[in-house]
Amino acid sequence: MKIKSLTLAAVLALASSSALAQWMPNEPAPAPVFNAFEDSSFENGLRTEQGTWLFGGNMFIDPATAMGTDIKAEVIGGHYIMYGFMVGAYGAIQDNDWLTTYALGATCKWHFFDDEMSPFSLFCGGDLGFAKTKTVTEDATAFTIGGRVGLDFYLTRNAAVETAFNLHLATSDIYTDKNGLTNVDFTITIGFVFLY
């Protein structure tokens, strides 16, 4: 009886292993691919989907103006009213050895190329606002309009490093360059943005 039981068990084990070998492929299963930006996929929500809030800031330093080192800092807040398109507001301060400029206004940002799987996202945007410049002798107020094109590099789904080329025009000479005051301002800024 023991011999029959052992023989039956051996037959069942052999049949099971044969069936398992036919069911499983001969090639080894591919190793799982690690995607550092998997949380940015369509399955987990879009980075710049409608309803997302953006907060951030950037900085620019120009040591070669006629009035000393020019330092500009800007903060931005906005809301994506549709996929890839944000509207919001900005505030900025710009200072050097001779004058200080405060600026407020409306801003927008459009991600015109973002496949949601790459850490890179190209965008363009625009500003409309006003600025007030204070000097030792007089103050000046101007309306400003500007545009930018740039690149976001997403460290995570909710945080990115932003680099942009900016061009602004003003109704008065409130900006500084190596020749003095001007109404045209070209800057290259770098900063961070956070999405919620």
Image (cartoon, grey):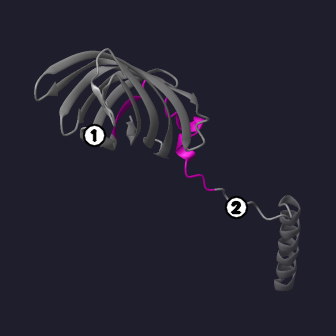
Q: Residue at x 87, y 80 (%)?
A: 7
**Local SS, label 1:** strand
The residue at the point 34 percent across, 22 percent down is: 183
Residue 64 x/y as whole percent: 33, 43
Q: Amino acid at mark 1?
A: Asp
Which residue shows up at 27% across the image and 24% down it? 174
- Is residue 182 shown left or right of residue 25? left
For the question of whether residue 109 can be seen, the reply is: no
In the image, residue 45 lies in the stretch drawn in magenta: yes
Q: Which residue is mark 1?
A: 70
Q: Residues within 10 Å of mark 1 (few under 14, many from 20)?
A: many
Q: In the rendering, at what x and y percent does residue 81 appear?
A: 44, 19
Distance from the alpha carbon under mark 2 to that under mark 1: 53 Å
Check disc 2 and give the amino acid type. Ala
Does the segment drawn in magenta span residue 134?
no
Looking at the rendering, the stretch of residues picked out in magenta corresponds to: 34-59
Q: Are marks 2 and 1 in contact (CB under 8 Å)?
A: no
Frontmost residue, 84 versus 76: 76
Q: Which residue is mark 2?
A: 31
In which quadrant will I find the N terminus? Answer: bottom right
